[in-house]
Amino acid sequence: MTQARLLSIAHLTALDATPLELIAAAADGGLDAVGLRIIAPRPSDVVAPVAGNPPVIRELKAELAARSVRLLDIEAVIVSPTLDPATLAPAFEAAAELGARYVLANMYVPDRAQAAEGFARLCRQAARFDLDVMLEFLPISELKTVGAAVETLRAAGAPNGRLLVDALHLSRSGGSPADLAGIPAELIPYAHICDAPAAIPAPEDLIPEIRTGRLLPGEGELPLTDLIRALPAGIPLAIEAPCRATAGLSVAERVARAGAAARKLLASL
């Protein structure tokens, strides 16, 4: 039976797209929302000039309204020992103005106690803009498993701290959908889906797979049906599936294929 739920396209699926292109592609592809990368994860990364840019914010706000597309989240904050959450205020202000509810964060603080403290500071800054912070575990970070992420959230004790489950990262961390049992539903407001082969790559191949080597939902061997059933019922799903095989296609075609794949998967449940 088909489940009606909000479907979003994560920016990494078509990272070369401008925000306007991604919004248009989402609308044309029958998707409800987008995620935008407006915070540079690494100093060398180039992101769309949205934060602190009122004319661009106004343009995007008008386009979201005109296209009936919402902004689900922004990304990506790297929580490091040197992070000053105050520097993120322009991006958080832009996110709030554009109607986003969530900001994605990855953890690169090795010490568990310091990681929780750093995440709590980030959450306090985000709370000023009514944003929840999605803590994402992934095996190439210092927060490698769903269990470690839940422990960090509990230690941080931030009312707006949330857990982001990504189908690929759950698999590559050695986890399974069964690991989500017992996690309070309110901690998981949405999730990332994609597909991949069942075999876990060598450690040196994890980053290329994450950034360019995923498959569309239903085109690989991940237990996506079990994952969706293990997640809180009806939560939004964001498709994060950058694929080498389709990298040469237009933004519109990549997003349309991603949306169609997700709908086909949901229809099989």
Image (spheres, rainbow, N blue to C red):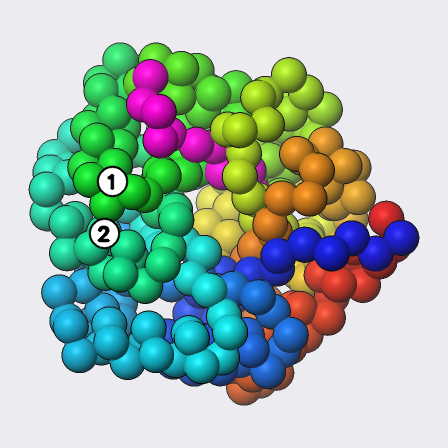
The answer, for residue 8, to whether it is visible in the render is yes
Q: Position of residue 71 (x, y in %)?
A: 42, 62
Give the numbered dot on residue 92. 2
Dots 2, 1 in contact, CB < 8 A:
yes
Q: Residue at x 52, y 19 (%)?
A: 147
User: Looking at the picture, how far across and down is residue 265, in whole percent?
Assistant: 79, 57
| Element marked by disc 2 | helix
* Residue 79 highlighted magenta (yes or no): no
Viewer-proximal residue among 241 and 261: 261
Q: CA distance from mark 2 to mark 1?
A: 7 Å
Q: Which residues are magenta?
A: 157-166
Which residue matches tag 1?
126
Residue type at the position of mark 2: Phe
Task: Tell me the residue at 40%/35% (across/down).
Answer: 135
Place of residue 90 in the rendered image (x, y in percent of width and height, measured from the top left)? 14, 56
Kindly indicate the quadrant of the structure image that contains residue 52.
bottom left
Is disc 2 surrounded by few (<14), some (14 to 19) or many (20+) residues within 10 Å?
many
